[in-house]
Image: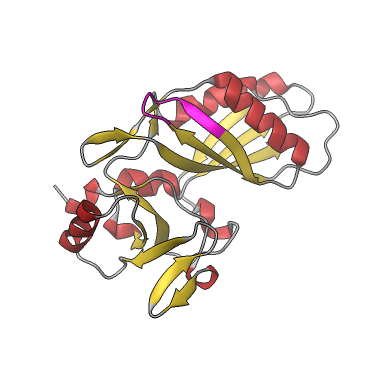
């Protein structure tokens, strides 16, 4: 088996090298107040050795160094199409052919991913298709929009029981849509397979982008 299959990130962090501070040759994230390790030129054994001796290690990686399943969904676009005339007809599309984060809060190098490395990322039970199908069936677009909805970034934690907590939006053009997205996710109470680190189930953080497409 390809060794790269074992490496996942908690989530793909929407930053780039230019947004980081470099002190004495080392990257530092002011947002998280953490040191960022550049693994983009490291071997699999070097990465494995680093994560075995450090907890919550955040780094810069090439997509080829990470699990193919993680990269597939980390670079996917989740599109919820909502009809103003009949919101019960909401549809879900998962586009894995384009890089979701390429036009994100901060533009990244096309082949670099940033985040905290884990052995196994939290994953929705039944898959992302089931997760977003449930979301689309419950989400209702606010009637008094304050701004056109667009790409929304959802941040939440998944505890050791697989439950979503601390749900919030970290970027949205519409305050009302963001509020409704958070309320919908809380009502869903969708369960995840928890993340694992060093063979143990751990609490993890996730960021998922959604595009709300109004027809």
- Residue in the image at 52% along x and 56% along y: 14
**Front position in the image: 168 or 55:** 55
Considering only vertical position in the picture, is 197 above or below 2? above
Q: Is residue 71 above or below residue 80?
A: below
Asked if 203 appears above or below 66 in the picture, the reply is above
Residue 201 in percent (x, y) is at: 29, 32
Q: Give residue 172's position: percent from left, percent from top.
A: 69, 46
Q: Which residues are magenta?
A: 159-166
**What kind of colouring is applied to the model shown?**
secondary structure
State the quadrant of the C terminus: top right
Is residue 71 a member of the stretch shown in magenta? no
Q: Is residue 204 left or right of residue 20?
A: left
Q: Nearer the viewer, residue 33 or 106?
A: 33
Q: Position of residue 109 (x, y in %)?
A: 46, 68
Q: Do we see residue 214 in this rendering?
A: no
Residues 83 and 45: in front is 45
Predominant SS along the magenta part: loop
Residue at position x 72%, y 23% in the image: 87
The residue shown at (21%, 55%) is 53
Q: How many marks?
A: 0
């Amino acid at each position: 088996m390809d060794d790269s299959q074992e490496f996942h990130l908690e989530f793909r962090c929407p930053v780039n090298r230019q947004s980081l501070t470099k002190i004495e040759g080392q990257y530092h994230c002011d947002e998280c107040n953490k040191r960022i390790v550049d693994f983009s030129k490291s071997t699999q054994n070097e990465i494995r050795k680093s994560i075995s001796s450090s907890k919550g290690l955040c780094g810069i990686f090439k997509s080829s160094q990470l699990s193919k399943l993680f990269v597939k969904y980390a670079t996917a676009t989740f599109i919820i199409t909502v009809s103003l005339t009949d919101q019960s007809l909401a549809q879900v599309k998962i586009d894995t052919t384009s890089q979701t984060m390429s036009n994100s809060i901060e533009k990244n190098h096309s082949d670099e991913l940033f985040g905290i490395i884990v052995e196994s990322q939290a994953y929705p039970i039944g898959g992302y298709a089931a997760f977003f199908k449930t979301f689309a069936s419950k989400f209702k677009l606010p009637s008094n929009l304050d701004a056109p909805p667009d790409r929304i970034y959802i941040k939440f934690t998944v505890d050791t029981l697989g439950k979503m907590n601390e749900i919030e939006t970290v970027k949205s053009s519409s305050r009302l849509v963001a509020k409704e997205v958070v309320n919908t996710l809380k009502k869903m109470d969708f369960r995840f397979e928890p993340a694992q680190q060093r063979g143990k189930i751990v609490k993890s953080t996730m960021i998922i982008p959604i595009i709300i497409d109004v027809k």
